[in-house]
Amino acid sequence: MSMTWIDEEAYENMINALNNFMKQVTTHCDVMTKAADDCIENTQDPTAKSNGTKLATHIANIKAQYETVEKVIAALEKQLEKAREARRQAEAAAAANE
């Protein structure tokens, strides 16, 4: 009897891609924040300060979405572990029947 399993590598790749996505977004948000801070400091421009505040709000909104991404990662990890456990049980049962 042949059994089809999930593509574990695809799950792992997606989990890694989502983790890398959050790291890259964090890095780029940090770069933008630093640039805005430098602009405010160097120009003392009220418009720059106002825009810096708006940018900080947008970045906070972006980072607030991390919770959703982390939930997706956790769900993928849970599905992957359940599939691995089912495979282990099926293999053990098959080996016992041999």
Image (tube, rainbow, N blue to C red):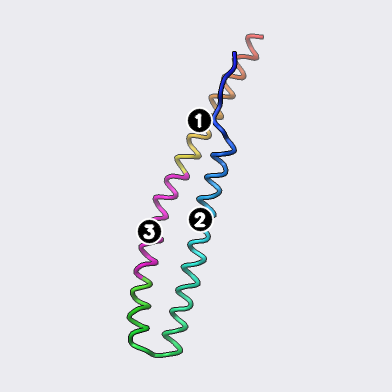
The residues bearing labels 1 and 2 have C-alpha atoms spaced at a distance of 25 Å
Q: Position of residue 66 (x, y in %)?
A: 42, 55
Q: Is residue 88 left or right of residue 22?
A: right
Mark sitting earlier along the chain (1/2):
2
In this rendering, the answer to whether 32 lies above or below 38 is above
- Residue found at x 44% / y 87%: 41
Q: Nearer the viewer, residue 14 or 34?
A: 14
- Residue found at x 49% / y 63%: 26
Q: Position of residue 34 (x, y in %)?
A: 48, 76
**Marking on residue 82:** 1
Mark sitting earlier along the chain (1/3):
3
Mark sitting earlier along the chain (2/3):
2
Q: Quadrant of the C terminus?
A: top right
User: What residue is shown with label 2?
Assistant: 21
Residues under numbered marks 1 and 2 in contact, where contact means CB atoms less than 8 Å apart: no
Magenta segment boundaries in residue numbering: 57-73
The residues bearing labels 1 and 3 have C-alpha atoms spaced at a distance of 29 Å
Q: Residues within 10 Å of mark 3 (few under 14, many from 20)?
A: few
The reply to whether the magenta stretch includes residue 81 is: no
User: What residue is shown with label 3?
Assistant: 64
In this rendering, the answer to whether 50 lies above or below 27 is below
Q: For numbered disc 2, what is the local secondary structure?
A: helix
Residues under numbered marks 1 and 3 in contact, where contact means CB atoms less than 8 Å apart: no
Q: Amino acid at mark 3?
A: Ala
- Residue found at x 39% / y 61%: 62
> Which is in the foreground here, disc 1 or disc 2?
2
